[in-house]
Amino acid sequence: MLQVCLNGGRGPGDAAGVPMSPVAMAEAAAAAVAAGADEVHVHPRTPCGSDTLSPRVLADTLTAIRAAVGGDVPVGVTTGARAEPDPVRRLARVRSWTVLPDRATVAWHEPGAEALATALLDRGVAVDAVLRQGTDGPARFLRSSPAPRVPRVLAEAASEEAALALLATLARSPHGRPVLLHGRDGAAWPLFRLARRLGLAARTGLEDTLLLPDGTPARSNAQLVSAALAEPAAATVSS
């Protein structure tokens, strides 16, 4: 499974192809799906470019993307603290959504993760538990009450070695879950190849990397998806 992560915290100052408006996100999503992406992950933005959990902006973004990619392609969103730092207000925002995503990421190292995940699951939204290497998120997740209901883990690491250590920690969970493994910037392509070698779900997109595997700047999310599908799996893990 290949997910495209359209924008993340990046903006036009990072790369011209970073989509910011619902229309631009829909166009980028459609091109990425046409290139071979199976899922879409997006950070809805306010008109001034900030991450937001606004019900209106979320509805506009999801409606535009779904019209562009069709109803069979899952579309997920962020619930990160960058969009709303206060965990009480973040939870209230999610509960006020009128149009629901198919999936939503919940960062387990952020305050209020358990309540947020529970609210999403209760509303029928699949949760991707973001477990970041170097934080207390993995340990908190393994002992959290919503963990058995979470359908997938999104494991994030800064190197192949760190990724393998994180995966070993998750393997000790009594509630085995499918894993999507990824890294950012310099770790993006090495961890993409590692995920392929291990048979795990993977992702690419301008949220994670601005560069193609050969180091040249990527023009679009679709170009990154095409490059990802052409990448061989990692043969070995560097020491």
Image: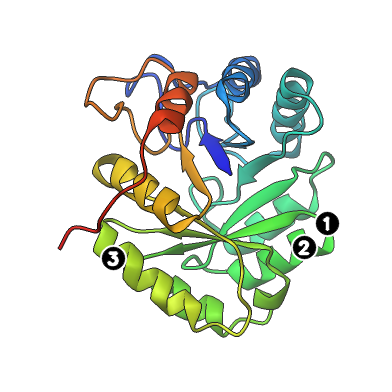
Visible in this render: residue 53? no
Badge 1 vs badge 3, beta-carbon distance below 8 Å: no
Q: Is residue 176 left or right of residue 61?
A: left
Relative to 114, say whether 129 is above or below.
Answer: above
Where is mark 2, residue-wise? 121
Q: Amino acid at mark 2?
A: Leu
Q: Amino acid at mark 1?
A: Gly
**Gap between marks 2 and 3 measured at Cα:** 29 Å
Q: Position of residue 135 (x, y in %)?
A: 36, 70
Where is mark 3, residue-wise? 162
Closer to the chain start, of discs 1 and 3, is 1
**Gap between marks 2 and 1 measured at Cα:** 5 Å
Closer to the chain start, of discs 2 and 3, is 2
Where is mark 1, residue-wise? 124
Q: Residue at x 42, y 26 (%)?
A: 224
Q: Quadrant of residue 53?
A: top right
Q: Quadrant of residue 175?
A: bottom right
Residue extending farthest to the left is: 239
Q: Residues within 10 Å of mark 2 (few under 14, many from 20)?
A: some
Quadrant containing the C terminus is: bottom left
Badge 2 vs badge 3, beta-carbon distance below 8 Å: no
Which of 183/118 is in front?
183
Q: Position of residue 151 (x, y in %)?
A: 69, 63
Badge 2 vs badge 1, beta-carbon distance below 8 Å: yes
Q: The residue tagged with tag 2: helix, strand or loop?
A: helix
Which of pointers 1 and 3 indicates the residue nearer the eye? 3
